[in-house]
Image (cartoon, grey):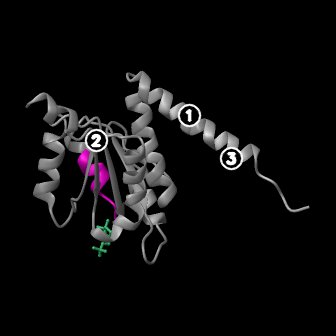
Amino acid sequence: MSQDAAKSAPRVGVVMGSSSDWEVMQHAVAVLKEFGIPHEAKVVSAHRMPDEMFAYAETARERGLVAIIAGAGGAAHLPGMLAAKTIVPVLGVPVPSKYLRGEDSLLSIVQMPKGVPVSTFAIGEAGAANAALTAVAMMAVSDAALAEQLMAFRARQTAAAQAMALPA
Ligand code: RP5
């Protein structure tokens, strides 16, 4: 791989079970864009594309991914099955579902048996954004410039909260 290709090779993978998950998962991608993290986003359905799902997980490490953000809804086995096939950290995002509002997604992602972890985030948009912020924090451990960016991001939130006013 050339140096230029290596620079732009994705470091974080954002995958989801369906294009219908994009409304939520786009918030992870927006954070990665904001921090300038090379990333990729694609549909990898666990039950409709099991072979592609395994191939994605099996090649993640050699392709240089440091984290996989995986969003799914309902019987949300995508994050757990990816985690079963790679040691790259998997950050799971429960996508709101039609009938159970994402409580099914949350429980099926968070309740991984001991030994194969999936870091699980809040249901929906906040979870997607926070999963990406966690990937940024993981990378910031060994990247001083990124750490500065993350601290500035936090400082802006502090300033915004400090400036909040309530009705008289
Ligand atoms: C899951 O089923 C997806 O992650 C999505 O949240 C849910 C519904 O998928 P679609 O029927 O919208 O394709 O696999």
| Position of 97 relative to 31 (above/below) | below
Q: Position of residue 27 (x, y in %)?
A: 43, 56
Please name the amino acid that badge 2 sits on.
Answer: Pro
Q: CA distance from mark 1 to mark 2?
A: 20 Å
Label 2: which secondary element: loop
| Closest to the observer, 29 or 52 | 29
Residue at horizontal 32 percent and vertical 52 percent from the top: 70
Please name the amino acid that badge 3 sits on.
Answer: Ala
Q: Position of residue 47 (x, y in %)?
A: 20, 64
Q: Residues within 10 Å of mark 1 (few under 14, many from 20)?
A: few
Circle number at residue 4: none
Q: Residues within 10 Å of mark 3 (few under 14, many from 20)?
A: few
| Closest to the observer, 116 or 38 | 38
Circle number at residue 160: 3
* Circle count: 3
Residue behind mark 1: 152
Mark before the other along the chain sequence, 2 or 3: 2
Q: Is residue 150 magenta?
A: no
Q: CA distance from mark 2 to mark 3?
A: 28 Å
Q: Is residue 81 magenta?
A: yes
Drawn side of residue 152 relative to residue 105, left or right:
right
Residue at horizontal 33 percent and vertical 40 percent from the top: 37
The outermost residue toward the front is 4
Magenta residues span: 74-82
Residue behind mark 2: 38
The outermost residue toward the bottom is 99
On whether ligand 1 comes within 8 Å of the CB at mark 2, the answer is: no
Mark before the other along the chain sequence, 1 or 2: 2
Q: Residues within 10 Å of mark 2 (few under 14, many from 20)?
A: some
